[in-house]
Image (tube, rainbow, N blue to C red):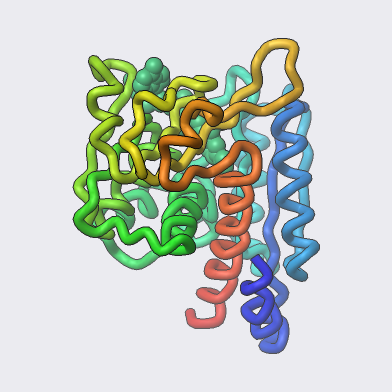
Amino acid sequence: MDSLVPRVESLIGRGLTPHLTVIVVGDDPASQVYVKHKVKACQRLGIRSSVMRLPSSVPESELLDHIDRLNVDPDVHAVLVQLPLPKGFDEGRVVRRVDPRKDVDVFHPVNAGKLLLGDPGLEPCTPKGIVALLDGIGCDPAGKHAVVVGRSNIVGKPIALLLLRRNATVTVCHSRTPDLGAITRQADILVAAVGRAGLIKGDMIKPGATVIDVGVNRVDGDKKLYGDVDFDSAVSVAGAITPVPGGVGPMTIAMLMSNTLEAAESCLTL
Ligand code: NDP
């Protein structure tokens, strides 16, 4: 992440302090932790951060008004609505309200469309972090069979697109995929983004495969975080495997910082 410091310094040198605003609605404990990590990352890099905390009773129209104001605030370059929102909010409507130029989570249909078409633009943080991890270990997806388990708009679909863009042959699995193991065992690169602790066991992994575990799962009565991959049985089979916590999570935060800088930089080039 420290490699981003020169970009921050360059922006500040040109009179622009990059500024990320995070909106948190309600008091979901996991969200509070995630927001703390984001603020800490900003502090470490010299990015300005603001957290707008709203009660879960806030009317959706008021939340949308706040987003509208941030969209036109020239001192704010990046706006993120921390998910999940409390029950009763239309998450799709809320995240689509963020100006696509400030949409560092890359949820807006304009940005999702650019991603699909391969146009330049912001890339979603977790998938972008996964690609950076692969690059970091010299794993070129080109010509490899990448299997993605999960098809969410946040992780599964966009990582499939990014891997396709990097010339992998991509298979996407989901809850209706029969005999998951028969497919995951074909993967040179296996991305697990399911939200089920330990779903992927060692015997579902091709020996030597690169395994990216996106899952962050809490198991009842246990403070520990668990991935979607059963690390103990997978570690001796995989060629490389990301741990949980400490693998994809920190990369996601780093890419959020990178997207914040990209959004700020684009203000200078307008
Ligand atoms: P979603 O719940 O939105 O999607 C889960 C996907 O997994 C769905 O496509 C679902 O299929 C599929 N699925 C569920 N059960 C099975 C199964 N038994 N076999 C195969 N596929 C299955 O989750 P997200 O994508 O938002 O998140 C996935 C995990 O990644 C979570 O643990 C989350 O906490 C974590 N996460 C971590 C991040 C990080 O920075 N480290 C960032 C974002 C998420 P279907 O579509 O058919 O329902």
* Residue 36 horizontal side relative to residue 73, left or right: right
Q: Which one is in front, 263 or 241?
A: 241
Q: Which one is in front, 227 or 63?
A: 227
| Residue that appears at 24% across and 28% down | 183
Q: Is residue 137 visible?
A: yes
Q: Which one is in front, 244 or 52?
A: 244
Q: Is residue 164 positioned above or below 217 on the image?
A: below
| Residue that appears at 74% across and 61% down | 42
* Residue 74 horizontal side relative to residue 122, left or right: right
Quarter of the rendering containing residue 173: top left
Q: In which of the image's four quarters is ligand 1 placed?
A: top left
Q: Residue 241 appears at what percent x and percent y?
A: 49, 43
Q: Residue 76 appears at what percent x and percent y?
A: 67, 63
Quarter of the rendering containing residue 153: top left
| Residue that appears at 48% across and 56% down | 133
Quarter of the rendering containing residue 258: bottom right
Q: Residue 48 appears at what percent x and percent y?
A: 76, 64
Q: Residue 240 appears at what percent x and percent y?
A: 46, 47
* Residue 11 horizontal side relative to residue 270, left or right: right
> Which residue occupies the extreme bottom position in the image?
13
Q: Is residue 28 positioned above or below 155 on the image?
A: above
Q: Quadrant of the N terminus?
A: bottom right
* Residue 170 horizontal side relative to residue 140, left or right: left
> Which residue occupies the extreme front position in the image?
236
How many numbered discs sit on the rendered protein? Answer: 0
| Residue that appears at 41% across and 46% down | 239
> Which residue occupies the extreme top position in the image?
220
Q: Is residue 93 visible?
A: no
